[in-house]
Amino acid sequence: MIGRALGAAIAIILLAGGVGWMLTSPEPLPASAVEGPPGDPERGALVFAAAGCASCHVAPDTDIGDAPVLAGGMAFVSPFGTFHAPNISPSPQGVGDWSDAEIMDAVMRGVSPSGAHYYPALPYAAYAMADPQDMRDLVAHLRTLPPSSQENLPHEVPFPFSIRRGVGLWKALNLRQGWVIEDDLPEPAARGRYLAEALGHCGECHTPRGPLGGLDHAQWLGGAPNPLGDGRIPNITPGGLKWSEGEIAYYLGTGFTPEFDTAGGEMAAVVSELAKLPDEDRAAIAAYLKAVPAIEPAAE
Amino acid sequence: MTRSFRLLAGSLVIAALAPMALAQGLDPERAQSLREGHMKLMGLNIGMLGAMAKEEQPYDAEMAAAAAGNLAALGSIDQRFYWVEGSSSEDLEESRALPAIWENMDDFNSKTEALHGAAMKMEEAAGTDLASLQAAMGPLGEACGSCHEDYRKPEE
């Protein structure tokens, strides 16, 4: 009797373990997403700016400029530990030896060339929604940037988050299969959704997170505590941001608010990258922000 | 050495040291409010230019040149006297000047100088025509933002 119960328990544990193992297994992109026309580095420069890659991957206290050195090294403090942005320049220490498919797996699936999970400090949950052609263009552009021989810094992540396999569970819960704002949006708001939800990953900072670090979609773009400690990242839904579409678009291109104060903090780097996009793209983001459901500001 | 020469030399030394003494002696709260005044004056003139750039106000070459001239003049001001120790966001409630300013004064000064450069470019552009003014707004915003990025505390 005891023997049978034990046997059943072991079977259940093995089964649960097996399902867990399958659930948490890293999943690269299908070949169909990787294959396609070769990337265009000039178009890729715009994708690169829209995706804000340089804002996190240049060395600390370095200006981005026109041909940034993506040496990595910036530290990102979170409740789960401190992550260091890696070198993603085209060099042996960076991603120079990786295939296009390996880079796309990293960016869109959070899977390393050796098949391990990346931590979601890399916003692959957003980039998962990117157009594969944009990603091929992005990779082509990445390969034109200056190389850096900087070695990567290890992340400082305590147990249990140090078990990368666990990230698979996070992915099962958080990797997106569709848009957050599912409505059938007209242009240019639909283009704005693509820029804001996929490439721009605005939600990573402007949306609050649940206990496991996933974005709370019910509070989409409703503002969140600043992970760096000072102040709050603002609510940019119509409930919090009262600027006109024109004012939002102008801010995204110049950094000037309607009162002619300017963007500061992390947003200054975002603006200087978005300034490289055509006017229509900034107008599209503004149109999308007007289409997002209003989150009323929390009572003071 | 004559007495009058010594007196003269002494007063020259005092005159040379006076600004430094003033800078060190300036009350931090007063320094903070003076700085804010400077920022507000810049904001007023940028606002004049920005309203035209966004075509909320009709373009007026003379008004634009005046605002840009003011901005360039404000950008040329040597600000050393009011960036006194003890007036950072950690010292004063109303200050948003991060302590990093005093840890990286050379970088901070180079950013101030970059703003002056952008303001002078605007001075050339603003009176020319609307398109030139509009094109100069981006670099101006970039210059403001690059300093606010590193050295201004976010709003609560």
Image (tube, rainbow, N blue to C red):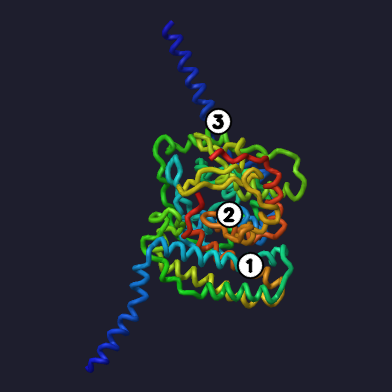
> What residue is rendered at 56% in x and 38% in y?
A299
Q: Nearer the viewer, residue A287 or A278?
A: A287
The kind of residue on which mark 2 rests is Gly
**Residue matched to label 2:** A52
Q: Is residue B72 left or right of residue A281?
A: left
Q: Mark 2 and mark 1 in contact (Cβ < 8 Å)?
A: no
**Within 10 Å of the Cα at label 2, are there few (<14), some (14-19), or many (20+) other Cα atoms?**
many
Helix, strand or loop for disc 1: helix
Q: Chain of mark 3?
A: A
In this view, the residue in front, A203 or A108, is A203
Residue A32's image quarter?
Answer: top right
Residue A44 % position (x, y): 64, 57
Q: Is residue A174 left or right of residue B130?
A: left
Q: Chain of mark 1?
A: B
Q: Quadrant of residue A49?
A: bottom right
Residue B137: give its label: 1
| Residue B134 x/y as whole percent | 68, 68
CB contact under 8 Å: marks 3 and 2: no
> Are the residues flagged by discs 1 and 2 from a single subunit?
no
Pointer 2 indicates a residue of which chain?
A
In percent of width and height, residue A247 lies at: 67, 56
Q: Which amino acid lies under the numbered mark 3 shown in the image of this protein?
A: Leu
Q: Which mark is residue B35?
A: none
Counting residues from the start of the chain, the first of labels 3 and 2 encountered is 3
Image side of residue A265 versus residue A186, left or right: left
